[in-house]
Image (cartoon, rainbow, N blue to C red):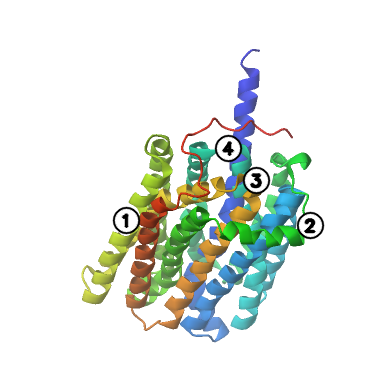
Amino acid sequence: MTDQPPQNDALRSLKILAVLSILMSFASISTDIYLPALPVIGKDLGADNGAVELTISSYLIGFSLGQLLWGPLGDQYGRRGPITVGLLLFILGSTGCALSGSVGAMIGWRVVQAVGACASVVLSRAMVRDLYVDHYAARMLSTLMTVMAVAPLVGPSVGGLILHLASWPVIFWLLVIIGLLTIPALRLLPETLPREKRTQQSLGATLIAYGQLLRNRRLMGYAGIVGSFYGGMYAYIAGTPFAYISYHHVAPQYYGVLFAIGIVGIMATNQINARLVGRLGLDRLMRFGAAAAAASGAVLALDAYAGWGGLWGLALPLFVFVSATGFIVANAITGALGCSPERAGAASALLGMFQYGTGILGSALVGYFADGTPRPMACIIVLFGLGSLLGALCLASFRDGGPPATYSVPAAKPKD
């Protein structure tokens, strides 16, 4: 009988981990699962490659701007209620995408879908900050990112299989089902922000407080690092379907395999990061990841212009670039949230706005400069990779408002 409470705590922690992983995966699954369908959607809706790629950019616009609303709402009303409202919007947007008869309609519904999906992501990150501090939070985020990587790992393969068996709208109907199943799963998640810790400011005053966060140079340094990296990541997401399928004639179902190789790299580096962050520190590991991203981007651009290695001349440096996620994202998020723990929701939203805002730029640039070759994608990736490295090297000079140098013990577990 004496070991029953620890067993209950372990089971409770696993349930929380599972639900948080699902919530954080909405950012990736909403896009990754339909990537193999982009060429087919273009043909069915009578749109060119650039127009179809705007369905990615429009999603990122809704995702980045929507976070600025959900973050303060989460600080004022708690985490679970706004997440539920966001899931309902996600279901509505996914339904609209499935019924779209033009690429313009799909672009609009993707914005609605994104505004709903971002509530799950921004507030689940804030929940991690509610529960853990310092390198414990970085370790937890790395573990969550490893678990949630299952979604993008299987997403493109599932999308390719659906295309093989049915039509592309079925992909969005599957997202509707995922949203509907997630709502009751929220009951397994405790409310991590009790009423006495919620902000008493009006929503308008909370929005104005973003100005204070923007003046925190260290927080903005972390935002710049992860934002630059995500610009390259979404150039990869927008560009590889056409680089692999259209240019190198890879079958849509096999595109999912190539995409999954990168996700395996992310899972591996997240686990390495979780093991090393307590000993080496999040800033040092983040700088290493940024250096790897910049170097692999340079090799990618060289291969794309010289034609070296064919398909694998693209796939191998892209694997290294994507794998750098494990050393950059969790550490940058933890560092940024540690700059203003009393406004974790708003800080998470601001970070996400930069993160996905540069994703808009990266994916849009791939569409704008599309020339039927992988070269525009490669150039954009190397530029953003170098930007991330530059930000990481400059961060050490931003001493004001940073997280404490010493690590504290994990925060107490919240009560239901």
Q: Left or right? Give the position of 269 relative to 199.
A: left
Q: Which residue is mark 1?
A: 291
Q: Which mark is residue 342?
A: 3
Question: Residue 202: which disc?
Answer: 2
Q: Which residue is mark 4?
A: 132
Q: Residue 152 at x, y = what percent?
A: 49, 56
Label 4 and label 2: CA atoms lie apart by 27 Å
Name of the residue lying farthest toward the front: 400
x%, y% of residue 167? 57, 72
Q: Choose the circle earlier in sequence order: 4 or 2.
A: 4
Q: Quadrant of residue 45?
A: bottom right
Picture residue at 45% right of the left edge, 82% below the top:
368
* Gap between marks 3 and 2 measured at Cα: 16 Å
Work out whether residue 246 can be spotted.
yes
| Amino acid identity at mark 2 | Ser
In this view, 138 is above or below 175:
above
Secondary structure under the numbered disc 1 in the rendered image: helix
Q: Residues within 10 Å of mark 1 (few under 14, many from 20)?
A: many
Which secondary structure lies at badge 3? helix
- Which x, y percent locates residue 120? 64, 54
- The residue located at (69%, 72%) in the rendering is 96
x%, y% of residue 253? Answer: 43, 64
Quadrant the C terminus occupies: top right
Instruction: Return the disc, 1 or 4, that comes first in the chain's sequence.
Output: 4
Q: Nearer the viewer, mark 1 or mark 2?
A: 2
Q: Earlier in the sequence, mark 1 or mark 3?
A: 1
Judging depth in this view, the residue of 145 and 208 nearest the camera is 208
